[in-house]
Amino acid sequence: MTTDLVPTPTAAPTRAFRLGIAGPVGTGKSSLIALLCRELSAELALGVVTNDIYTDEDARFLRSAGVLDPQRIRAVETGACPHTAIRDDVTANLLAVEDLEADFAPLDMVLVESGGDNLTATFSPALVDAQIFVLDVAGGGDVARKGGPGIGRADLLVVNKTDLGPYVGVDVEQMVADASAARDGRPVIGLSRTDRPSIEALTGWLRGVLAGFRSGGHVAVDPGPMAPHFHADEDHPGGGYVHAHDDAGSHTHG
Ligand SMILES: Nc1nc2c(ncn2[C@@H]2O[C@H](COP(=O)(O)OP(=O)(O)OP(=O)(O)O)[C@@H](O)[C@H]2O)c(=O)[nH]1
């Protein structure tokens, strides 16, 4: 008897779900990870990998927040070009994720925080299964309209610190609507750590994506390469240079 016509069931994944969290400096990536650890560590076995340029500051912040066993929080020091370590050469991050998975098997989820970067940073789908891009209202109501691969095509866009809207003159509802329009219907959540329903929207979204991953139905989507961006460099004429990541062989990183 032949089994050719029998559909092959999708194999259930044997490793942890890997979730990337990217966004500009100070938008609340570490705080969002601390929040997720607080909310989910009773039901899910978690690990965290942070990326900083020269320090392990984000890892130290998370360890001191007491949200997870400090051993489950690992730091990658990326050197001069933080987006490179989550996009072009993800080796150091993959090793950190795999070490965590081996040391604390079985883990349900590893959260990978990118170094605070510019608007264009995205994770490679070779490193994460899904990614959240974080903006905050204090960065200005028009940021979401500026677009870029993370804002446009990350699996989830978080508009963070909505509690600050009245203090910085930002219409939060309008900012979330602009973000939704820029994303062709992909999900957007306005979040504040002081707003319980928004926290539940975030954990609800994550549980849904995790369930899809566990059933074998989740496909990692690449938001696309980083847009061309400016690097400050005092030694360079003009104070810096513009480069892109659409062709890894077309430029070098100092
Ligand atoms: N008002 C308010 N402040 C928040 C919220 N979430 C985070 N913050 C504050 O925003 C600041 C930056 O938060 P972080 O979590 O360090 O931001 P980050 O994106 O990890 O920063 P980098 O790693 O330096 O890029 C801190 O002072 C947080 O306390 C929020 O929901 N509301």
Image (cartoon, helix red, strand yellow):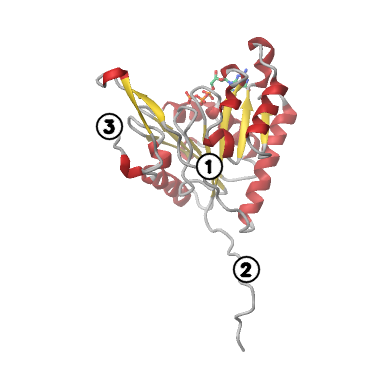
The residue lying toward the viewer, choosing from 66 and 1, is 1
In the rendered structure, the answer to whether residue 197 lies left or right of residue 126 reads: right
Per the image, the residue denoted by label 1 is 223
Q: Quadrant of residue 42?
A: top right
Mark 3: amino acid: Gly
Please name which of the two marks, 2 or 1, marks the residue nearer to the observer. 1
In the rendered structure, the answer to whether residue 173 lies left or right of residue 57 reads: right
Per the image, the residue denoted by label 2 is 9
Give the residue drawn at x 29%, y 37%.
252
> Do the numbered discs 1 and 3 sit on residues whose CB atoms are within 8 Å?
no
Mark 2: amino acid: Pro
Confirm whether residue 3 shows in the render: yes
Give the residue drawn at x 32%, y 22%.
240
C-alpha distance separating marks 2 and 1: 28 Å
Please name which of the two marks, 2 or 3, marks the residue nearer to the observer. 3
Check disc 2 and report its element: helix, strand or loop.
loop
Comes first in the chain, label 2 or label 3: 2
Per the image, the residue denoted by label 3 is 254
Mark 1: amino acid: Pro
